[in-house]
Amino acid sequence: MQSELIDKNPLLRHSFQFSLNIISYCESLEVRHRYTLARQLFRAGTSIGANAFEAQNAESKADFIHKIKIAAKEADETQYWLLLCRESTKYPDCDTLLSSLEEIHKILNSIIKTARKNNPLRFFLVSMGLWLAFIPLHK
C-alpha cells in the first residue's frame, strides 16, 4: 500500500528516488573519507522525503502545510551541501542530484503556493505560528 502511495504521488515518487540517490552519493563520499559532509547531506537529503511522506498523514491542513514547509527547508539545506560538493575539489559529480532537487523544489513550491492561494490569511497566520491565538474557545 505504501508503494502505491509513492507511485501515485509525484512529490513522494521524486523525493523517494532522490533519497535513494543521496544514499548512494553519500556512500561514495564516505569511500573518499568525506564523512562529515556525507552525514550532513544524508540527513538533509533523506529528510525531504520523510517530511513529505509524514505530511500525507497530517492531522490538519495547517499540519500538512507545516510539514511541506519543513521539507522545503530541508531541500534548501540539501542544495547548499550539494553546491559545496560541486564547487569543491575531489568530490564526485552531483549535477544529476542538483537537477533532481530542482524538480522537487518546483513541486514543493507549487504545493505551498496552492495552499497560500486557497486561504492566504490562515496560511500567513499558520506560518507565523499565530493561528492558535485566533481560534475561539468553546464556552
Image: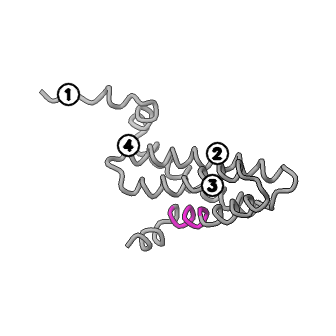
Q: What number of labels is visible?
A: 4
Q: Position of residue 89 (x, y in %)?
A: 87, 52
**Which circle's residue, 4 or 3, is located before the other in the chain?**
3
- Residue for badge 2: 77
> Whole-Å distance between the Cαs marked 1 and 4?
18 Å
Q: Position of residue 115 (x, y in %)?
A: 44, 46
Q: Is residue 17 above or below residue 135?
A: below
Q: Nearer the viewer, mark 3 or mark 1?
A: 3
> Whole-Å distance between the Cαs marked 3 and 2?
11 Å
> Whole-Å distance between the Cαs marked 4 and 3?
28 Å
**Which circle's residue, 1 or 4, is located before the other in the chain?**
4
**Which circle's residue, 2 or 1, is located before the other in the chain?**
2
Q: Nearer the viewer, mark 4 or mark 2?
A: 2
Q: Residues within 10 Å of mark 3 (few under 14, many from 20)?
A: many
Q: Residues within 10 Å of mark 1 (few under 14, many from 20)?
A: few
In the drawing, does residue 102 fall left or right of residue 65?
A: right
User: Magenta span has 21?
Assistant: no
**Residue plotted at (44% across, 43% down):** 66
Quadrant that contains the N terminus: bottom left
- Residue for badge 3: 42
Quadrant that contains the C terminus: top left
- Residue for badge 1: 137
- The amino acid beneath tag 4 is Ala
**Which circle's residue, 3 or 2, is located before the other in the chain?**
3
**Residue plotted at (20% across, 27% down):** 137
- Range of magenta residues: 12-19
Indicate which disc residue 62 carries. 4
Q: Nearer the viewer, residue 132 or 28?
A: 28
Q: Position of residue 129 (x, y in %)?
A: 42, 30
In the drawing, does residue 130 fall left or right of residue 114?
A: left
> Whole-Å distance between the Cαs marked 2 and 1?
38 Å
